[in-house]
């Protein structure tokens, strides 16, 4: 039996040549310009975040207890990702961390092919709390620590 | 270890052709604004990997930034395809993946698909610019074999195990290896040399 050869080579990096061209700007100016360019998207991004949270609650929350088991793992995962996408506008809120924990939870549920509704309800409540309440950084951290413990638990551990 | 971004680093992205791929419009908008802020003059947006594939068959780009989680063809499949199926001039492009959920398994998946780097969302301008600079300074060679085509997946070269003679030209001599490399295996490599 023969194995296919392995080829190792230097590929041309056009990006490298272009970024070194004369002109351009300093990194600090590029970052300031990017921050300024993002600002007009703040309101609509937060609206996207809130809409995703409402959709999660209406499709997968307690109010949908009778129908939520028919939902698709991928749909909830995508909604949690939508929150992460725009959560950069709430830098110290830990909303992004809660949504990441939510993704991990849905991933585990999908792998085990079984929903964990208590854990999902906890994540939905925590997201709402982190988004709307005036919590201290320590309180936010405590919420995230709790969520991570919940989401990392496997179904077999219940 | 790759260099962190310095405030005084000068960068010119005016002529860089960037393809941005994401099926989430809010995310596409955010990344577009960041890149335009960096002074990127040639930005093309694709709202699906399928659309990106069409573009990568027709035009030459210098950098691809793609989401991972997309309906239909995802970002990992897109990179894998790009390395073998895109226009010849696009196969060795720098590719940065952007993902909201990045457990190690997903980062390895991106690496094994042939991506240069993965960025975790929510994106920040600093991390995006830093990764673009890393991609521009990429010094890893490309590896092509039956199962993989992309940048060398080894980020650092500590040389062969302690006591073993390196077989590769680029293996660092014993004297230049990091301290951990000589202590591996719980014996002193120098003592077992004939």
Image (cartoon, rainbow, N blue to C red):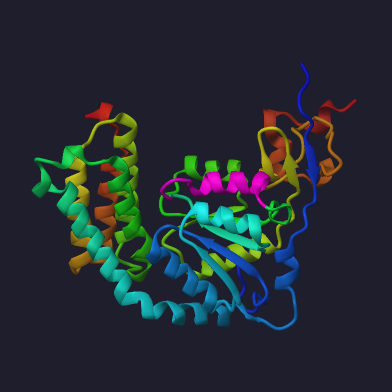
Q: Where is residue B186 in the image (x, y as percent from the top left)?
A: 68, 29
Q: Does the magenta stretch include residue A55?
A: no
- The residue located at (60%, 66%) in the rendering is B18
Which residue in the rendered view is the most extreme toward the top? A1
Magenta-colored segment: predominant secondary structure? helix
Q: Where is residue A41 in the image (x, y as percent from the top left)?
A: 37, 76
Task: Report whether B75 appears left or right of A146.
Answer: right
Task: Report whether A38 appears left or right of B132.
Answer: left
Task: Report whether A22 appears left or right of B20.
Answer: right
- The residue located at (32%, 47%) in the rendering is A77
Q: In which quarter of the image is residue B4?
A: bottom right
Q: What stretch is highlighted in magenta?
A: B70-86
Image height of B97 relative to A39, above or below:
above
Q: In which quarter of the image is residue A113?
A: top left
> Which residue is nearer to you in this view: B163 or B132?
B132
Q: From where the camera sits, is residue B154 visible? A: no
């Amino acid at each position: 039996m023969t194995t296919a050869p392995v080829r190792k080579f230097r590929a041309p990096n056009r990006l490298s040549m272009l970024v070194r061209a004369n002109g351009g700007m300093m990194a600090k100016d590029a970052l300031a310009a990017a921050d300024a360019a993002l600002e007009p998207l703040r309101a609509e991004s937060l609206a996207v975040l809130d809409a995703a949270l409402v959709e999660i609650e209406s499709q997968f929350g307690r109010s949908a207890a009778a129908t939520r088991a028919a939902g698709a793992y991928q749909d909830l995962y995508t909604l949690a990702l939508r929150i992460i996408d725009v959560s950069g506008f709430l830098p110290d809120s830990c909303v992004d961390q809660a949504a990441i924990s939510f993704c991990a939870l849905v991933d585990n549920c999908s792998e085990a092919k079984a929903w964990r509704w208590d854990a999902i309800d906890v994540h939905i409540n925590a997201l709402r709390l982190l988004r709307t309440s005036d919590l201290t950084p320590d309180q936010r951290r405590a919420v995230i620590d709790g969520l991570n413990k919940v989401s990392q638990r496997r179904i077999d551990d219940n | 270890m790759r260099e962190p971004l310095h405030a005084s680093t000068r960068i010119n992205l005016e002529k860089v052709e960037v393809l941005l791929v994401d099926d989430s419009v809010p995310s596409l908008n955010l990344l577009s604004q960041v890149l335009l802020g960096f002074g990127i003059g040639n930005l093309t947006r694709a709202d699906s990997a399928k659309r990106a594939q069409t573009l990568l068959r027709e035009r030459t780009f210098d950098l691809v930034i793609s989401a991972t989680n997309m309906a239909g063809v995802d970002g990992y499949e897109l990179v894998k395809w790009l390395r073998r199926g895109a226009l010849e001039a696009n196969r060795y492009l720098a590719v940065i993946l952007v993902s909201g959920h990045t457990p190690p398994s997903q980062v390895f998946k991106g690496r094994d698909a042939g991506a240069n780097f993965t960025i975790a969302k929510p994106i920040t301008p600093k991390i995006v610019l830093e990764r673009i600079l890393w991609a521009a300074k990429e010094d890893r060679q490309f590896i092509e074999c039956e199962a993989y085509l992309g940048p060398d997946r080894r980020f650092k070269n500590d040389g062969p195990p302690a006591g073993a003679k390196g077989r590769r030209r680029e293996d660092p001599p014993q004297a230049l290896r990091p301290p951990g490399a000589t202590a591996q295996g719980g014996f002193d490599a120098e003592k077992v040399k004939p």
